[in-house]
Amino acid sequence: MPSKAHIKNIYSLKDKKSRQISQLFTIEGIKSIKEIATEDTIVIKELYAVPSMAENIPHNYSNIAQIVSPEEMKQMSSQSTPEGILAVCQIPSHTLHEWDKDTLYIALDGIRDPGNLGTIIRLADWFGVSDVICSMDTVDVYNPKTIASTMGSIARVRVHYVDLATTLSRCPVPVYGTFLNGENVYEELLPMGAVMVIGNEAHGISPAIEAVCRERVTIPRFGDSRTESLNAAMATAILLGLWRR
Amino acid sequence: MPSKAHIKNIYSLKDKKSRQISQLFTIEGIKSIKEIATEDTIVIKELYAVPSMAENIPHNYSNIAQIVSPEEMKQMSSQSTPEGILAVCQIPSHTLHEWDKDTLYIALDGIRDPGNLGTIIRLADWFGVSDVICSMDTVDVYNPKTIASTMGSIARVRVHYVDLATTLSRCPVPVYGTFLNGENVYEELLPMGAVMVIGNEAHGISPAIEAVCRERVTIPRFGDSRTESLNAAMATAILLGLWRR
């Protein structure tokens, strides 16, 4: 049974600072934990379930699983109504050592909304994009809200936090940025090997990153629409769909 | 100055029943109200602003605008921190009398999430789709949360609630449904004139609507991904992007 102090430590993982110090994060819910347990890319260090959830403990983790009371679960969970199964995982340390020239990468320049980041990771997973490269000011993927919204896709997509301008200036594949005044994306030949940069929800791609974008593309608006912009996750969905045509 | 009873009536428009009886709905925020005032497709019946928002009242509605106290605004608003400008609008009565055989339509079969519906309307606006045809069990577009998430696009997209199976069985343009076992959407020639059906977030397209879908398409998954499904709004974004290629 976890001590009161330990429960408090688990709860504190909702805060970025605690995650950075311990290099741990939490993931909740049957679906997500099953995917993590199956994929074997993220190490589960501790696993807690309430009695009614005991049967949902993945077999390969039954040796470390601990049954806790609903009250204890509530104290360790960051959710207001916890599903009843929670894993403490090690933050994976991915390094982007080598670029694959035939692969599509997604780069995020200052995405701030946890839900948008989660949705983008789900989309990357669907379209077979294995690496998402984030600027240091992009929201932390290991915050509980983002982890929940990836719905398990975090187990199959590597998320890197880097000095984005430096990384992109040195990468050997073409860097595509989306701008309001770029080339019509329908008229461009999009190469399989590329980095696709998505900008911040309100301000788009920052000047430092714009300087390293070698190609500028635009998703055209149709008809009489005067709508101002697409949400960052929507733009990602449309671009990934077109990239894979 | 609105009476206490009138303020209560405005607040009650957050509930579907009140909207149905009065055929009125509310819309809040500068951006959305400006778009409504410009487009001239939705009639603003009443307009309220707090003193600090007075300068944001659209000129063509200054004759009906009323200044209210922040306290009164809080009582009529459905938001916890109101932006300070609120319009009471007439629910437009659109009829889908004639089908245009060269136009793309979106049909929604039981979309339940207000945010998803709002996002789909924004996407329709971006891609020049003027009519979104909803099954009767699709969430009400005039609820404040959906209206807010359309970010003004509601002024340019007509939303119809109909008996979807009957309507689609009689329509003269091909009806495309998205299914897990349809034709690869990348290998299909998607005609400009078509209805694209998006199913419920959890259950997909219902059997009654499946029966009237003449074409079955699938957005393929790439790589080793085992992710189960795309969110309904994401699928809409990808399909609209491909339809317009």
Image (spheres, coloured by chain):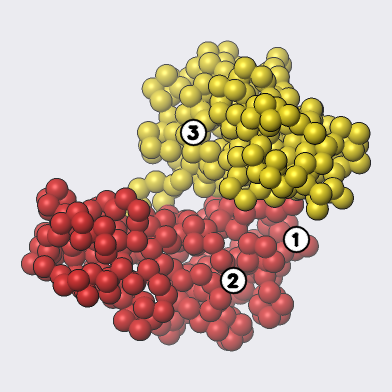
Chain colours: A red, B yellow
Q: Write down the quadrant of residue A175 in the picture.
A: bottom right
Q: On the picture, is A39 further left or further right than B188?
A: left
Q: Residues within 10 Å of mark 3 (few under 14, many from 20)?
A: many
Chain letter for mark 1? A
Disc nearest the viewer among 3 and 1: 3
Q: On the picture, is B139 further left or further right than B49?
A: left
* Amino acid of disc 3: Ile
Quarter of the figure that contains the N terminus of chain B: top right
Q: Residues within 10 Å of mark 2 (few under 14, many from 20)?
A: many
Q: Earlier in the sequence, mark 2 or mark 1?
A: 2
Return the x and y of residue B77 as percentages of the image width and height. 65, 40
Secondary element at image label 1: strand
Chain letter for mark 2? A
Residue pointed to by mark 2: A110
Return the x and y of residue A90 as percentages of the image width and height. 28, 75
Q: Is residue A176 above or below residue A119?
A: below
Tell me the CA gap for discs 2 and 1: 17 Å
Residue pointed to by mark 3: B111
Residue pointed to by mark 1: A180
Q: Residues within 10 Å of mark 1 (few under 14, many from 20)?
A: some
Q: On the picture, is B169 further left or further right than B160?
A: left
* Amino acid of disc 1: Leu
Secondary element at image label 3: loop
Whether residue A193 is visible to the viewer of this picture, yes or no, is no
- Residue at screen point 35% across, 53% down: A80
- Residue at screen point 59% across, 86% down: A166
Q: Are marks 2 and 1 in contact (CB under 8 Å)?
A: no
Whether residue B238 is visible to the viewer of this picture, yes or no, is yes
- Residue at screen point 91% across, 41% down: B59
